Image (tube, rainbow, N blue to C red):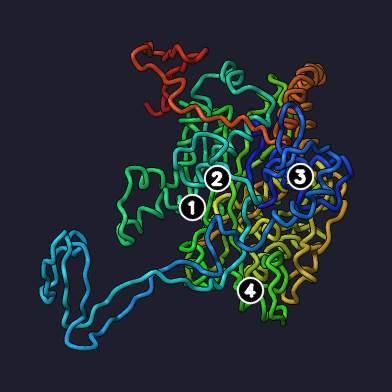
Amino acid sequence: MTSLPVVIGMGGINAAGRTSFHQGFRRIVIDKINAQAREETFVGLASLMKLVSMKDGQLVDQAGNIIAVNEIEAKFGQQILDGTLIRKIEKNHFDVDATHWHQKMHVQPTDKNISFELRAKELPQPLPHTWLVTDIGEGKVSVEIPEELVITHDAYRDNPIKAAGQMPTGFDPGVLYNSRYQPRGLQATIFAATDAIRSTGIEWDAILNKISPDQVGTYSASVVGQMQQEGLGGLLKSRLSGSRVSTKQLALGLNTMSTDFINAYVTGNVGTTFSSSGACATFLYNLRTAVQDIQAGRVRVAVVGSAEAPITPEVIEGFGNMSALANEQGLKKLDQSETVDHRRTSRPFGNNCGFTIGEAAQFVVLMDDELALEMGAKVLASVADVFVNADGYKKSITAPGPGNYITMAKSVALAQNILGKESLQERSFILAHGSSTPQNRITESLIYDRIATSFDINNWPVAAPKAFVGHTIGPASGDQMAMALGIFSDNIMPGITTIDKVADDVHSDRLNIAVEHWDCGEMDTAFINSKGFGGNNATAVVLSPKVTIAMMKKRYGEKAMDEYEQKLVLVEQAQNEYRQRANQGEFDVIYKFGEGLVDENEIEISDSSLNFKEFKNEISLPAENPFADMM
């Protein structure tokens, strides 16, 4: 019997806000949700953005004035809307109107020599043989150079790329715990993993008490590593900018660190640890391995995700010089205007000129269906499978290829085999990669159109999260997963509101690419698709909570489901408690630095098991020869 990987929690942060309980999704479709959900969304975002906080059991604004929940939108609504989703890059990242760099200067002598004074300890080593140095006392020297001198000097330039999908204005994950000068991506990881785990409504220790400690897995990675000053960014430029490399920059910059931080400081995991980078498909690559481990019975609980904080001048310049990012000149040309609307820089399947970078951390908690039933876990969805295929031979490493045809076709065929033709044709939708480049809009839409033709699908709904939160690189398909769960929950299909119409060269005869949000009714299946640089293609088949519950009922019967429903009541109570606290800005971030350390001297080892005093259950050792038929 193949275990079904069930999504029981999801948490994180991107430009739309907090992921748990669909806050970010509801920010995207804010004008389509009901009044209660709208009020909750504004309260949660106001707390996240530090516009309000809790004091003595009451919400207060920054001036300390008590404010009612139903007053928040009127007072802060526009500020909240303006401070979320894609917008002009804020100065806490860097100044896009005056981006710091070092200007190279070729200085020529005006007479015989270039002359200057400086401290003796600032002289370069070794000293150039043409330099004439005279000691003038008090630790200073006079220098005369009889030839051209090449120097670099602080300078500032107008950056041609000015927009990004940034975490909400005012949100700083590093102040929520003792972040110890960690890179922003790792700070976001701690927040996101906490949000995902807390959103389950089940205490982590309660889960561990039900399983062997090696039946837990953590699966995560970033793509470009941690490129802030505290990570690889500082490592690469410290010496060239006159600073010293710190003892932490290399280690904290590794793209495995999001996995390592969760194991070491959030869950205390001693089970599976896995990090795979697959460009824009990184979240799905890690999800695939977790799904396969759960299906095979190797793991029963998995924390899966990705984190990326790439809004740095260096990363943006790298993508920009590839002509991959939407820049000011291209946007002005598209709109035939001298004014750029930074809210609309990302335009999937519309007339566009490049993608918009974003930052995010997205994590899901998966559990096998039997354990989910036993613990009364709230079912958000399930993952039937994730398919990964490469592009084969290619001329340009960044160009698209045939791999995505394979992943999409396999996914659609699997969904049809599980749920039937009617469900596929009437109640499935696509969360597109939708990067917002001219090449993507043609090639990706052609894949969908051809597969729709092959499976006789008409008016196939296509949504594109990058229109709102940008391209977050590693966690991008995590943003898609968050949107899928929101659609399952609220029955609203987000339109691509950043475009006026679908571009003429998009293959959309069998697709429904809407430019407005619309009520879609209950959906059964989401196809999460990613077309990553280098030929990293992946597609996930995600089944709705309604479908998942029906499958579990079929497997376990009415009596087991009745008992499950009774346990679910308590879990939902715990979820609602966290939901209320989180909406008030009280996240209770899990960061167990130096806590709960395993005493290796106390490990009891036999030829059949290992016992740890820190865990309730033992770890069994292999007891059979898997190759007995070959011996």
Residue 72: x, y in percent? 81, 44
Mark sitting on residue 117: none
Task: Name which residue lies at 63% across and 77% down.
Answer: 330
Task: Name which residue lies at 68% across and 32% down.
Answer: 199
Residue 54: x, y in percent? 71, 32
Classify 502 as above or below 40. Answer: below
User: Spatial distance from mark 2 to mark 4, Cα to Cα?
Assistant: 27 Å
Residue 526: x, y in percent? 73, 48
**Residue that carries the numbered disc 1 in the rendered image:** 223
Q: Locate the N terminus by quadrant.
A: top right
Q: Is there CB contact under 8 Å for labels 2 and 1?
A: yes
Q: Quadrant of residue 610?
A: top left
Q: Locate the C terminus by quadrant.
A: top left
**In what element is the residue under mark 1?**
loop
In this rendering, does residue 153 appear at all?
Answer: yes
Residue 435: x, y in percent? 63, 63
User: Spatial distance from mark 3 to mark 4, Cα to Cα?
Assistant: 29 Å
Q: Residues within 10 Å of mark 1 (few under 14, many from 20)?
A: many
**Residue that carries the numbered disc 3 in the rendered image:** 486
Relative to residue 474, is residue 467 drawn left or right? right
User: Spatial distance from mark 3 to mark 2, Cα to Cα?
Assistant: 19 Å
**In what element is the residue under mark 4?**
loop
Task: Name which residue lies at 18% across and 83% down.
Answer: 113
Relative to residue 601, is residue 22 drawn left or right? right
Q: Amino acid at mark 2?
A: Ser
Q: Amino acid at mark 1?
A: Val
From the viewer's side, name the closer residue of 105 and 256.
105
Q: Amino acid at mark 3?
A: Gly
**Residue that carries the numbered disc 2 in the rendered image:** 306
Mark sitting on residue 353: 4
